[in-house]
C-alpha cells in the first residue's frame, strides 16, 4: 500500500530521513516510534507530498506519488496531526465535510452523521463550533475529517499527543477498531512505546533518519530489535513491573 525505496530527505547538512526502504502491505497497522527529531514526521509527510524526497521514490498503491496530483493523492490518504487544524469559523459538520466539498462532491448530511458516529461523537455535535468542544472531541472531529473522503491509507502524526491518558487510550482503541472495520492501512507516529505495542501489528523504531528496528510487538517484548528498540520497550516494562510490585 505504501513503499519507500531508498528515500533520503535533507534539510541543509542534516539527513532527516536517510536512505530508508520500507514496504507496508495493505491492511497493516504500523507504529513509528523514536526520539524527537529522528525523522518520523518527515518520513510520514513524504507519503502525501507535504515533504518531497531528495532521493529515492515513495509509492502509494504501487504508484510513484510524484506522478500524482496532490489533491487526488490526499483524497486517498487520511491525515491527522497533533495540532488538529480545524477551521475555527466552521462548525463540526462543515469541518468534517470540507475535503469532499472542495473537491466538488459535498457529502450528504447522513454521511456526516455516520462519520461522527464512527468516531464516537453524538449527532448533536454536528452544529457545534470547534471552540465549544473538548480537546478529545476536537481530535475525534479531525479523525472523522480524515476519513471523510473514504481513504485507503490513514496517517496519524502524534494525533493523540495532547490528550489526557483516558481519552488517549479510548481514541487509540477506536482508531484500531476503525482500521479493522474500514479495511484501512494505518501508520501511527507516537512517542509512546506502550501505545505502539498495544495498537500496532508492526513497530518501526527510527533513530537519526534511519529505521533501526522493524518488529512485531511480541518480538520486541521478547527482546528483539536491538538496543534502541529495547531502551524504548524498557520504559513501559519497568512501569508495569513497578505497578505490580506495589500490589505485593
Ligand atoms: N522544514 C524543515 N526545515 C528544516 N529542518 C527540518 C524541517 N523539518 C524537519 N526538520 C529537521 O529534520 C529532523 C527530523 O524532523 P522530524 O519532524 O521528521 O522528526 P520527528 O521524529 O517527527 O520529531 P518529533 O517527534 O519531535 O515530531 C529534525 O532535526 C528537524 O529539525
Image (cartoon, rainbow, N blue to C red):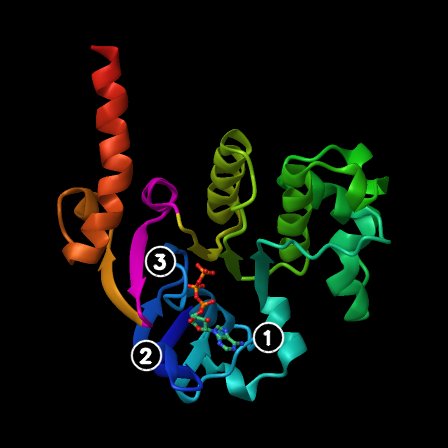
State the residue position of label 1.
Answer: 73
At a point 59% along the width and 75% down the height, the residue shown is 73
In this rendering, the label closer to the viewer, 1 or 2 = 2
- For the question of whether residue 131 can be seen, the reply is yes
Disc 1 and disc 2 in contact, CB within 8 angstroms: no
Residue drawn at (25%, 15%), measured in percent from left and top?
246
User: Of 212 and 186, which appears nearest the observer?
Assistant: 212
> Dot 3 surroundings within 10 Å: few (below 14), some, or many (20 or more)?
some
Helix, strand, or loop for circle 3? Answer: loop
Can you tell which mark lies on residue 35? 3
Q: Which quadrant is home to the N terminus? A: bottom left
Residue 63 - label:
none
Give the residue at mark 2: 18
Residue at 36 percent of width and 64 percent of height: 25
- CA distance separating discs 2 and 3: 15 Å
Q: Position of residue 122 (x, y in %)?
A: 74, 32
- Of residue 156 and residue 84, the one placed in the foreground of this image is 84
Amino acid at each position: 500500500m505504501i513503499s519507500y525505496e531508498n528515500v533520503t530527505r535533507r534539510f541543509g547538512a542534516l539527513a532527516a530521513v536517510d536512505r530508508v526502504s520500507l514496504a507496508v502491505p495493505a491492511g497493516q497497522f504500523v507504529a513509528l516510534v523514536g526520539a524527537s527529531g529522528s525523522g518520523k514526521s518527515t518520513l510520514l509527510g513524504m507519503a502525501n507530498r507535504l515533504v518531497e524526497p531528495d532521493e529515492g521514490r515513495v509509492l502509494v498503491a504501487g504508484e510513484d506519488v510524484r506522478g500524482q496530483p496532490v489533491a487526488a493523492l490526499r483524497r486517498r490518504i487520511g491525515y491527522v496531526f497533533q495540532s488538529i487544524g480545524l477551521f475555527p469559523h466552521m462548525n463540526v459538520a462543515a469541518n468534517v465535510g470540507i475535503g469532499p466539498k472542495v473537491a466538488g462532491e459535498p457529502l450528504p448530511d447522513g454521511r456526516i452523521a455516520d462519520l461522527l458516529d464512527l468516531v464516537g461523537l453524538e449527532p448533536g455535535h454536528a452544529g457545534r463550533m470547534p471552540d465549544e468542544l473538548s480537546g478529545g472531541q476536537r481530535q475525534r472531529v479531525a479523525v472523522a475529517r480524515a476519513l471523510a473522503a473514504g481513504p485507503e491509507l490513514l496517517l496519524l502524526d502524534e494525533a493523540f499527543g495532547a490528550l489526557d491518558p483516558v481519552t488517549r487510550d479510548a481514541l487509540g482503541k477506536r482508531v484500531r477498531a476503525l482500521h479493522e472495520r474500514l479495511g484501512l492501512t494505518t501508520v501511527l507516529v507516537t512517542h509512546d512505546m506502550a501505545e505502539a505495542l498495544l495498537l500496532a501489528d508492526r513497530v518501526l523504531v527510527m533513530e537519526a533518519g534511519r529505521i533501526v528496528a522493524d518488529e512485531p510487538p511480541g518480538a520486541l517484548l521478547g527482546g528483539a530489535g536491538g538496543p534502541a528498540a529495547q531502551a524504548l520497550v524498557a520504559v513501559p516494562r519497568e512501569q508495569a513491573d513497578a505497578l505490580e510490585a506495589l500490589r505485593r
